[in-house]
Amino acid sequence: MATIFGSFEFLCLLNLVMPSTGCKISTLGMEDGRIKKSQITTTGVARGTTARGWQARLNKNIPSYGAWCAYVNIGSKKYRNYDQYIQIDLVNLTTITGIATQGRHPSRGNEHVTNYKVSYSKDNRKWTFYNEKDQSSNEIKIFQGNTNDSSVVRHDLNPAIIARYIRVHPGYELGNSACMRLELYGCPVEEVILSYSMPVGQKTKNGKVHYKDTTYTGLITNGL
């Protein structure tokens, strides 16, 4: 187990797993089919449709519906809902550096997702929502989605996600269509840190370094 004695060593340790170290970023396989049907699951599909998760491939129009459309007949009438999701199993631990989305095409022009949240997991048991870039806050990031059914909107993730499983949670209002196609970007993880020690929640005197590892989703013991 690595022990960290100061902010300098802490930053060096994290550099071992950041994507800037030898990660050749490319598509992860939604569009070209390397991600198989069996790796894609959803909480449900829109009532009366066959808009399955495996149809949610960027730039593709796969019969019979051409996108994944979430089940939108449950949830709050007052607030925007994020309870539905499409889940992708990347099989191996992966550095995820970006995500791109589209709506359903052809459609009536309104079958797209205007915003969404992202969560991720290493083991499909403990899930973490992606936070805003200011990782000292616990505010879940809401990604801006699409304004039509065909344009692609891409977001780079900074910091990147290190996970095997990823979920995209479309924001929707009760009864309104929420359809999407997507692609993920990144690279396989070659090296990982199994365990280490650091003070959780502390800051340096100048406030510039906050000891919070947002890529780690394992066990925290005694505040370390």
Image (cartoon, rainbow, N blue to C red):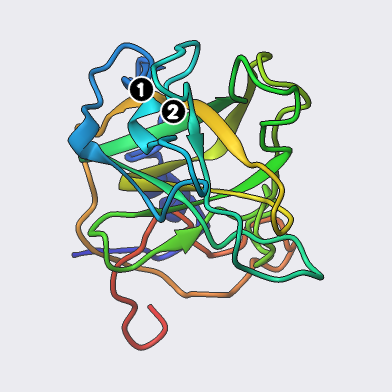
Q: Is residue 92 left or right of residue 7?
A: left
**Residue 147 screen position, x and y as percent:** 78, 26
Residue shown at 18%/37% (left/top)? 38
Asked if the residue under mark 1 is in contact with the one under mark 2, i.e. CB atoms within 8 Å, the reply is yes
* Residue indicated by mark 1: 30
Q: Is residue 94 visible?
A: yes
- Quarter placement of the N terminus: bottom left
Q: Is residue 90 left or right of residue 11?
A: left
Residue shown at 32%/39% (left/top)? 16
Q: Is residue 90 visible?
A: no
Q: Is residue 201 left or right of residue 62?
A: right
The local crowd at label 2, few if under 14, some if 14 to 19, many if 20 or more residues have their Cα within 10 Å, is: many
**Residue 102 screen position, x and y as percent:** 60, 23
Q: Quadrant of residue 30?
A: top left
- SS at badge 1: loop
Q: Is residue 208 left or right of residue 101?
A: right
Residue shown at 23%/38% (left/top)? 39
Q: Amino acid at mark 1?
A: Met
Q: Which mark is residue 56?
A: 2
What is the residue that sits farthest to the right in this orientation?
Answer: 78
Q: From this view, report whether residue 22 is shown above or below residue 219.
A: above
Q: Amino acid at mark 2?
A: Ala
Mark 1 or mark 2, which is nearer the start of the sequence?
1
User: In front: 4, or 82?
Assistant: 82
Residue shown at 29%/67% (left/top)? 218
User: In front: 189, or 147?
Assistant: 147
The local crowd at label 1, few if under 14, some if 14 to 19, many if 20 or more residues have their Cα within 10 Å, is: many
Q: Measure the C-alpha gap from mark 2 to mark 1.
A: 8 Å
**Residue 21 screen position, x and y as percent:** 37, 26
Q: Quadrant of residue 128?
A: bottom left
